[in-house]
Amino acid sequence: MKKIGDPMDVDTDHGPQINKYQQDRILAMIDQGVKDGCTLLCGGKKVEGLKGHYVQPTVMVGMSDHMEIAKEEIFGPVQLIFKFKTIAEVIERSNASQYGLVAGVFTNNINNAMTVARCARVGTVWVNCFFALNANAPFGGCKQSGSGRDLGEEALDAYTEVKTVYIKTPPLV
């Protein structure tokens, strides 16, 4: 990470939460995760000394799928790390979520990457990268993670309405 701070500074790559409510929500989810048995590896607190609603980058392990922190969209700088034994388990767990915005796959095995990309019910899959966006490629989720797409030609669908018109005409001679 380069810098936590003003999001208008080009050297900053970690800005504040939108408001105090969201900051408090994230911190409460982290605290509840710890109470439920997660291990906090780093972060998990407010960033002091900056004006705004900052949360430290946070990494947690030891979650179970039924925990709130594992099921809800946090929308904050929190990374949960899960253990798995098979690719099938990863796909099943991912698809069991009510959300489906993105999946990130980090692997040296292209077959595993392609299997997850093909089977994950999400709008975007990033392989060996994260938050890579291109204005020509559509971005959006499925299930409870939104409807429609931003970016790409597909974004124009929100501004159009298709109409079909049938007209009976006399037969051609």
Image (tube, rainbow, N blue to C red):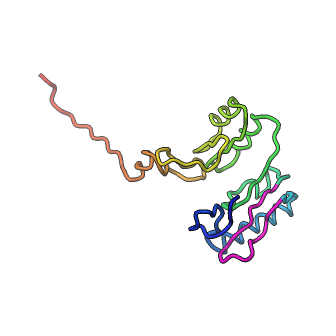
- On the image, the x and y values in percent for residue 59 come to 79, 57
Q: Was residue 54 drawn as part of the magenta stretch in this picture?
A: yes
Which residue lies most toward the left here?
A: 173
- On the image, the x and y values in percent for residue 38 come to 85, 57
Q: Above or below — where is 84 with respect to 67?
A: above
Name the residue at 60% across, 52% down: 144
Name the residue at 74% across, 62% down: 57
Q: Which residues are magenta?
A: 42-60
**Of the pair 113 and 33, the residue shown nearer to us:** 113
Q: Quadrant of the C terminus?
A: top left
Side of 9 where 78 appears, left or right: right
Q: Above or below — where is 19 with respect to 30?
A: below
Q: Was residue 41 drawn as part of the magenta stretch in this picture?
A: no
**Of the pair 20 and 160, the residue shown nearer to us:** 20
- On the image, the x and y values in percent for residue 103 come to 66, 45
Q: Quadrant of residue 45?
A: bottom right
- On the image, the x and y values in percent for residue 110 come to 68, 31
Q: Quadrant of residue 126?
A: top right
Side of 27 where 21 appears, left or right: left
**Of the pair 11 and 142, the residue shown nearer to us:** 11
Q: Above or below — where is 166 with respect to 159?
A: above
Name the residue at 66% across, 77% down: 51
Number of marks: 0
Q: Above or below — where is 2 with respect to 104?
A: below
Which residue lies most toward the top here?
A: 173
Q: Quadrant of residue 1?
A: bottom right
Name the residue at 42% across, 52% down: 158
